Amino acid sequence: MSNATARLDTHTRILDAAIKVVREKGYAATRVEDLCAAAQVTKGGFFHHFASKEDAAVAAARHWSAVTGGLFANAPYHAPEDPLERVLGYIDFRAAIIGGTTADFTCLAGTMAQEVHLTNPAIRDACADAIFDHAATLVADIAAAKAQRCPNADWSPESLAQFTQAALQGAFILAKAKGGPDVAREMVAHLRHYVELLYSQGAVVQATAQTGHAAD
């Protein structure tokens, strides 16, 4: 292994450790020593790569986006031709990956944003980028489904994409409060029902309006 490869490997191990430990303990309770132990690096090795715990947390939020971005980009919900099936498939996929302990399925960006949004703008902004950038990946399918079924509905694809993330983050909070995944799955099921209802009601309103115009 070359020196450059070894440095990259150490850097990535620290970021992976940050994701794991912060999801388990929270940002405030996580110490540099915890990250070093999880990544199996010395403190000197840690500070060779990151100036501080905050610096590592900002990088971890970006690493989280890259890792999860690959997971979602290759997920099966992209396959259906019908855009609404893709939207609902995304929600089903989110439900399917809820399992194990809360640290296994909750969101690093949401966890840190809840803790530091008033005290650490750098981490907060990195977490916001992670959450809103992921929401943006849903906009095209939501917009295509809206154009097919309810083009005149008074909501925007961007707002619905962001609402899915609000519902998911809320589900994760309830899971932490309950100490398990079941309640999170229930909340994601409600999210699915809401999205189905939103499109079906919009389609009914659209059809009623068209019928009214035809009668005129």
Image: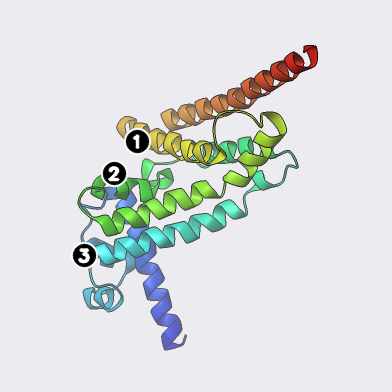
State if disc 2 and disc 3 touch (CB < 8 Å).
Answer: no
Q: For residue 43, which quarter of the picture?
A: bottom left
The residue closer to the viewer here, 148 or 62, is 148
What amino acid type should be assigned to the residue bearing mark 3? Glu
User: In x, y percent, where is residue 11?
Assistant: 37, 73
| Secondary structure beneath label 1 | helix
User: In x, y percent, where is residue 25?
Assistant: 26, 49
User: In x, y percent, where is residue 169?
Assistant: 40, 38
Q: For residue 5, which quarter of the picture?
A: bottom left
What amino acid type should be assigned to the residue bearing mark 2? Gln
User: For the residue carrying disc 2, how many other residues have a C-alpha within 10 Å: few (<14), some (14-19), or many (20+)?
Assistant: some
**If you read the primary sequence from the N terminus, does the residue marked by circle 1 or circle 3 appear first?**
3
Distance CA(mark 1)–CA(mark 3): 27 Å
Q: Is residue 186 above or below residue 40?
A: above
- Residue occupied by mark 1: 173
- Residue occupied by mark 2: 114
Q: Is residue 165 left or right of residue 51?
A: right
Residue at position x 49%, y 59% in the image = 67
- Can residue 37 be seen here? The reply is no
- Residue occupied by mark 3: 33
The residue closer to the viewer here, 60 or 145, is 145
